[in-house]
């Protein structure tokens, strides 16, 4: 024998089923102990709920809920606010630009020093020599670059 689904038993107790289906359920319950017990449990729960009467929340419930919602909104805004994200992004980009600028100044020697050093074949200028060695630049390439840069 197939049992009655709980959803249908709820509908039976709430009076949402057709008269024909209600008769079928009453007939089934009379012969099926499991469905009868389930139906009695649902009837008991329904009567408890209906006997509770009109239930109203405490008078401070709405204010408490509003306060909690506001506090949660403030907390989320504190960590996820677009202003703070934008400020942090600007700070990171500023530090990055400053670091790249400093690196580029260190990586290439001043133009006037390198032109003089290359033209005069001054091997005493350690900055120019070091730069040329690190970047594998020949004397001729340095001269062409120096002359081109001066023009």
Image (spheres, grey):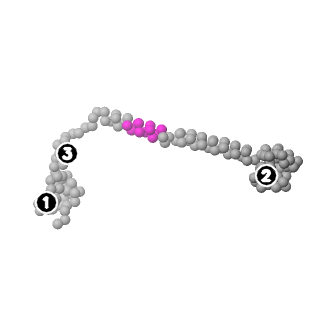
Q: Position of residue 148 (x, y in %)?
A: 83, 51
Per the image, the residue denoted by label 3 is 49
Q: In this rendering, would 110 be left or right of 20?
A: right
Is residue 49 or residue 148 the one in the foreground?
148
In the rendered image, the residue lying farthest to the left is 30
User: Of the residues under marks 2 and 3, which one precedes in the sequence?
Assistant: 3
SS assignment for the magenta stretch, majority: helix
What is the CA distance from the residue labelled 1 to the residue labelled 3? Answer: 24 Å
Mark 1 vs mark 2: give the one in front: 2
Residue 58 screen position, x and y as percent: 27, 35
Question: Local crowd at mark 3 within 10 Å, few (<14), some, or many (≥20)?
Answer: few
Residue 90 figure quarter: top right
Query: Callout 2: helix, strand or loop?
Result: helix
In this rendering, position of residue 9 left or right of residue 130: left
Q: Residue at the spot x=37%, y=35% of the render?
A: 67
From the viewer's perspective, is residue 125 above or below residue 138? above
Image height of 121 relative to 30, above or below: above
Pick whichever, 63 or 136, lies toward us: 136
Q: Residue at x 73, y 45 (%)?
A: 106
Q: Nearer the viewer, mark 2 or mark 3?
A: 2
The residue wearing badge 1 is: 33
Q: CA distance from mark 1 to mark 2?
A: 98 Å
Question: Dot 2: within a 10 Å radius of its alpha carbon, few (fewer than 14), some, or many (20 or more) residues?
Answer: some
Q: Is residue 7 left or right of residue 135?
A: left
**Residue at position x 70%, y 43% from top?**
102
Residue that carries the numbered disc 2 in the rendered image: 132
Is residue 96 among what the camera can see?
Answer: yes
Residue 108: give x, y in percent of width and height. Answer: 75, 47
Q: Depth-wise, is mark 1 or mark 3 nearer the camera? A: 1
Q: Mark 1–mark 2 contact, CB under 8 Å? A: no
What segment carries the magenta color? 68-78
């Amino acid at each position: 024998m197939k049992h009655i689904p709980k959803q249908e038993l709820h509908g039976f107790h709430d009076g949402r089923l057709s008269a024909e289906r209600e008769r079928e359920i009453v007939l089934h319950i009379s012969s099926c102990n499991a469905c009868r017990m389930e139906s009695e449990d649902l009837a008991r729960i329904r009567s408890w709920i209906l006997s509770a009467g009109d239930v109203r929340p405490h008078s401070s419930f709405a204010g408490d809920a509003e306060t909690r919602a506001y506090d949660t909104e403030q907390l989320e805004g504190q960590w996820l606010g677009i202003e703070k994200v934008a400020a942090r992004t600007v700070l990171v980009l500023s530090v990055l630009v400053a670091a790249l600028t400093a690196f580029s100044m260190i990586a290439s020697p001043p133009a006037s020093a390198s032109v003089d050093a290359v033209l005069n074949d001054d091997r005493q200028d350690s900055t120019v020599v070091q730069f040329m060695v690190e970047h594998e630049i020949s004397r001729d390439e340095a001269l062409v670059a120096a002359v081109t840069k001066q023009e």
